[in-house]
Image (cartoon, rainbow, N blue to C red):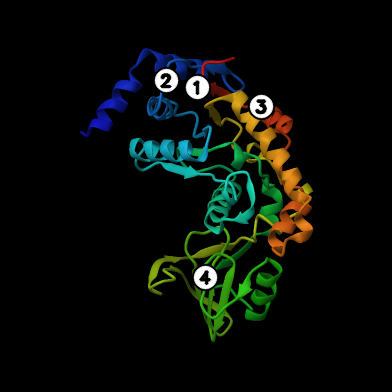
């Protein structure tokens, strides 16, 4: 048994963790708890130990104060909760609260999580999502809207290549000779390669006449197959293909029994206000920018007011890690 396993077992049996889990089970949704005296990785241990003991609750959201702190907590939780679903939910930009450069990798991470939640309705198994204020500032697509826009391709079914091209272009995909990043597709004879906005690896669809013969994921650098599938979902660009009225906060798509672990509630609101002010300033400069994707994001004001986030948070059980009511 590793040292981490020993420590996690000790935290699970700690009176404070037992009190936390007992209170959450007895009081249910909407309860607020305030924890004092935790520093650094202790926060991760308490969250992990509580999550293991709370079999009735399958989703936890940790809101760190910064992207760097969130990365540390993510690393802790991946080591403590091996085999569980641990996700990082970042903002869409290269630097938090600097809106001039999008980060495609982080946009993909956001899309993957949203796709997983909205695809199944709830996340499978025990899930922990780690995020920070700047990521919560951006809205996400409503589940019902995304599900209506999702295209399912299944092995053995008919598929018209011309229809696929039309749909992919409408969804914001670009045709390329070879796919290597989200939002690209290529067609060579009876082979369709596409890199969905909601998947870590691209898909390869092989057709026999107009029937889907095989579906696989593959490594774009080696072209080697990774996994055979019976179906796939094509997800459009979640950042730019939807209007303001088709988006909500992340809290609007989380399972209702999700427990929120908040590092510093007042700092969260202050940081959201800072993001809002910077976004307002940046929006006034958009006419000088050439990046259409940025124009789409800011045109539809796909961001949240701090008060909206506070209202959304109030509907969930909250555990405040700074001990301040």
Q: Earlier in the sequence, mark 1 or mark 4?
A: 4
Q: Secondary structure at mark 1?
A: loop
Q: Is residue 39 visible?
A: yes
**Marking on residue 38:** 2
Residue furthest toward the left?
Answer: 1
Q: Secondary structure at mark 3?
A: loop
The residue depicted at 50 percent of the width and 70 percent of the height is 180
Disc 1 vs disc 4: which is toward the camera?
1
Label pair 1/4, CB-CB below 8 angstroms: no
Compute the Cα span from label 2 to label 4: 51 Å
Q: Earlier in the sequence, mark 2 or mark 3?
A: 2
Q: Label 1: how many residues lie within 10 Å, few (<14), some (14-19) or many (20+)?
A: many
Label pair 2/4, CB-CB below 8 angstroms: no
The residue depicted at 52 percent of the width and 73 percent of the height is 179
Disc 4 vs disc 3: which is toward the camera?
3
Compute the Cα span from label 4 to label 3: 41 Å
Label pair 3/1, CB-CB below 8 angstroms: no
Residue that mark 4 sits on: 155
Residue 73 location in percent, x, y? 43, 35
Compute the Cα span from label 1 to label 4: 48 Å
The answer to whether 11 is drawn above or below residue 209 in the figure is: above
Residue that mark 3 sits on: 315
């Amino acid at each position: 048994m590793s040292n981490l396993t020993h420590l996690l077992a000790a935290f699970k049996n700690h009176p404070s963790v037992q009190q936390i889990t007992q209170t959450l089970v007895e009081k249910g949704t909407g309860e607020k708890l305030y924890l004092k005296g935790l520093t650094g990785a202790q926060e991760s241990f308490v969250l992990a130990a509580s999550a293991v003991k709370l079999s009735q609750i399958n989703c936890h959201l940790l809101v760190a104060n910064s992207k760097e702190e969130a990365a540390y907590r993510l690393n802790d939780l991946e080591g403590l909760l091996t085999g569980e679903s641990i996700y990082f939910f970042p903002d869409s930009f290269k630097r938090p609260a600097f809106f001039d450069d999008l980060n495609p990798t982080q946009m993909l991470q956001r899309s993957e999580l949203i796709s997983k939640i909205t695809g199944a309705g709830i996340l499978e198994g025990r899930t922990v999502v780690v995020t920070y204020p700047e990521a919560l500032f951006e809205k996400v697509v409503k589940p019902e809207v995304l599900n209506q826009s999702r295209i399912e391709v299944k092995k053995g079914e008919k598929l018209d290549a011309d229809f696929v091209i039309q749909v992919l272009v409408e969804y914001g995909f670009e045709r390329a000779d070879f796919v290597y990043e989200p939002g690209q597709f290529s067609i060579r004879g009876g082979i369709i390669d596409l890199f969905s906005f909601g998947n870590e690896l691209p898909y390869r669809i092989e057709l026999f006449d107009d029937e889907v013969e095989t579906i696989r994921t593959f490594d774009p650098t080696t072209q080697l197959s990774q996994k055979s599938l019976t179906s796939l979902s094509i997800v459009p660009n979640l950042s730019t293909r939807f209007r303001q009225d088709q988006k909500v906060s992340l809290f609007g798509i989380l399972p209702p029994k999700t427990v929120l672990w908040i590092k510093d509630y007042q700092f969260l609101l202050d940081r959201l206000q800072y993001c809002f002010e910077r976004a307002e300033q940046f929006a006034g400069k958009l006419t000088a920018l050439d990046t259409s994707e940025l124009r789409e994001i800011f045109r539809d004001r796909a961001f949240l007011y701090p008060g909206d986030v506070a209202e959304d948070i109030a509907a969930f059980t909250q555990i405040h890690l700074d001990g301040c009511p």
